[in-house]
Amino acid sequence: MKKAFKIIGIVLGALLALVLVAVVYIELTHKKDFSSVPLPPITASKDPAIIAQGAYVVNALAHCQACHQPHDFAHERKMNPDTLDFGSGYVIQAGPFGIFRPANLSSHPEAGIGKMSDGLLARAIRHGVDRNGGLAPLMSLAVGNMSNEDLTAVVSYLRSLPPKGNVVPPDEWGFIAKALAGSFKPHDEKPIAHVPPGGVSIERGRYLANGPAFCYGCHTALDMSTFQPVGPRFSGEPTAEPDPFEPGSEFTVPNLTPDKETGWIVKWSEDTFLARFKSAGRLYKGSKMPWENFARMTDDDLRSVYRYLMSLPPTKKVTGPSYRKAGWKPG
């Protein structure tokens, strides 16, 4: 019996040693250097028209202020009345994945992006690589691809923002995020072809939904290591997420393809779609849909997105009610 206990002790000790070695290895190696990712050929402009274009992309399409604003506003899913405040302060508690803090995007030279080159700033937006060459996972999860024209406009607009001295501490990766770090990669998509605003068209809707508005980022199942789709675009989120403000309830991101049985908006008219964004707004506080930003989109752009979604191949996928009691099952 003593011999058996001794063997068990040796085995447990060996397993503990292996775990400790694995933990130490992960802690020492999880940081990856992506500073070799090329800088996009972007140069900020002081042209008022280009800055105005950037303001539209940042404030309406790319919904940047939903995260890059003070914590109380972002956490409560509200928009800061100061539309020029991108000093952040928002703290995202992601459990074992860590604590993430959207950056100060103001022009402040120390606390903000004032000393970042145009190329470094453009790379952070396009590829999710921060100024030090590390991966910025929130950028990869929240920012869609866009044309060089719109990226230039965005960088130009951010340069025009007033300085905010709020110092944002670095992200704190949790153990799970560190363990998965080896599989994470920066966005490597080529710039999407630009379709300028003006009128209503499927082409403009395609650009917006797959580009700066990043609709597919939520309405599509993604490989979380590459952030690329693993199923038909716009067919809905694979799993529901709990309502952060209402225990026992959950949200799911619906199927936007025009499938007659499971498509969420297939029975909506174009005018209904437009009114949903412009008039109804946020119905549930905990929804992660940035309704307040998208309400700033032009009528033409919203109509273009609708026409594009209606042109998609139908995908039969039951996502269920977008807001429901936790644990909902079909049928």
Image (cartoon, rainbow, N blue to C red):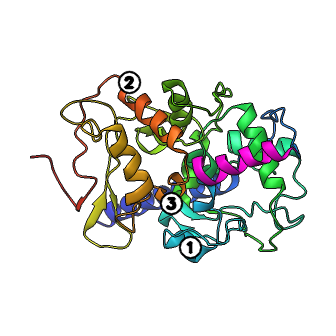
| Residue 237 in view in this figure | no
Residue at the spot x=35%, y=48% of the render?
253
Identify the residue at the far bottom of this view: 72
| Residue 27 in view in this figure | yes
Q: Quadrant of residue 220?
A: top left
Label 2, residues with CA under 10 Å away: few <14, some 14-19, many ≥20: few
Identify the residue at the far left of this view: 331
Q: What is the secondary structure assignment of the residue under circle 1?
A: helix
* Residue at numbered disc 3: 292
* Residue at numbered disc 2: 311
Residue at the spot x=14%, y=46% of the render?
330
Task: Answer with mark 1 or mark 2, whichever residue precedes in sequence.
Answer: 1
* Residue at numbered disc 1: 73
For the record, the magenta segment spans: 47-62
What kind of residue is marked 3?
Answer: Glu
Q: What is the secondary structure assignment of the residue under circle 3?
A: helix
Magenta-span inclusion, residue 207: no
Q: Main secondary structure of the magenta part?
A: helix
What kind of residue is marked 1?
Answer: Phe
Task: Answer with mark 3 or mark 1, whichever residue precedes in sequence.
Answer: 1
> Left of 162 or right of it: where is 72?
left
Residue at the spot x=63%, y=27% of the render?
195
Task: Answer with mark 3 or mark 2, whichever residue precedes in sequence.
Answer: 3
